[in-house]
Image (spheres, helix red, strand yellow):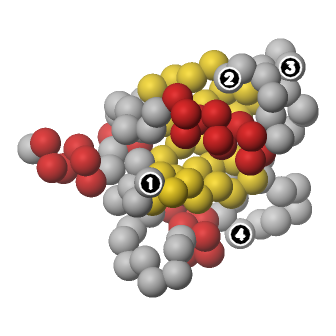
Amino acid sequence: MCKEGIRGVFWLVEDELVIARYEEGIMEGLSKAGNNYNHEKLWESVKPKGCNKKYNYYPRGRVEVSNKGKPLVYMSPYIDYEQVQAVMQALGINAEPIIHIDGSKHYRCHFDEEKN
């Protein structure tokens, strides 16, 4: 089981994880649903110093919690299992997540553009 309410978003920036844990009451970067962050809205406040890339340049993902308390990870196919485990650890989640590899337009990044 996952601690109730542990959610967040993350990016893989030059082999380093940038993780934003959702904090109740922090309005900056909120998604429409209001219980997690929107990658695009949050990017300016979390991107690494000196980075001039847009939020969707890098592979990214999101951590949600199912109705049964299980951690759910939606992410780019360019993020591997070890990186997911590092995200879980950073968020304080010790349960095994259900992983959804999302190759949709929503999680596209520069690797997808290089294929075309």
Q: Earlier in the sequence, mark 1 or mark 3?
A: 3
Q: Earlier in the sequence, mark 2 or mark 4?
A: 4
| Residue depicted at x 9% and y 44% | 116
- Residue 81: horizontal and vertical position, in percent? 52, 29
Q: Amino acid at mark 4?
A: Glu
Residue named by callout 3 = 1
Residue named by callout 1 = 15
Is residue 9 placed above or below 25 in the rendered structure?
above
| Residue depicted at x 75% and y 53% | 21
Contact? badges 2 and 4 (CB < 8 Å): no
Instruction: Indicate which disc residue 97 carries.
Output: 2
Query: For the residues marked 1 and 2, what is the alpha-carbon distance in whole angstroms?
Result: 21 Å
Residue named by callout 4 = 28
Select label 4 or label 1 by which is in front: 1
* SS class, disc 3: loop
Query: For the residues marked 1 and 3, what is the alpha-carbon distance in whole angstroms?
Result: 29 Å
Q: Residues within 10 Å of mark 2 (few under 14, many from 20)?
A: some
Query: For the residues marked 2 and 3, what is the alpha-carbon distance in whole angstroms?
Result: 9 Å
| Residue depicted at x 77% and y 53% | 22
Contact? badges 1 and 2 (CB < 8 Å): no
Instruction: Kindly tell me whether residue 9 is visible in this rendering.
Output: yes
Select label 1 or label 3 by which is in front: 1
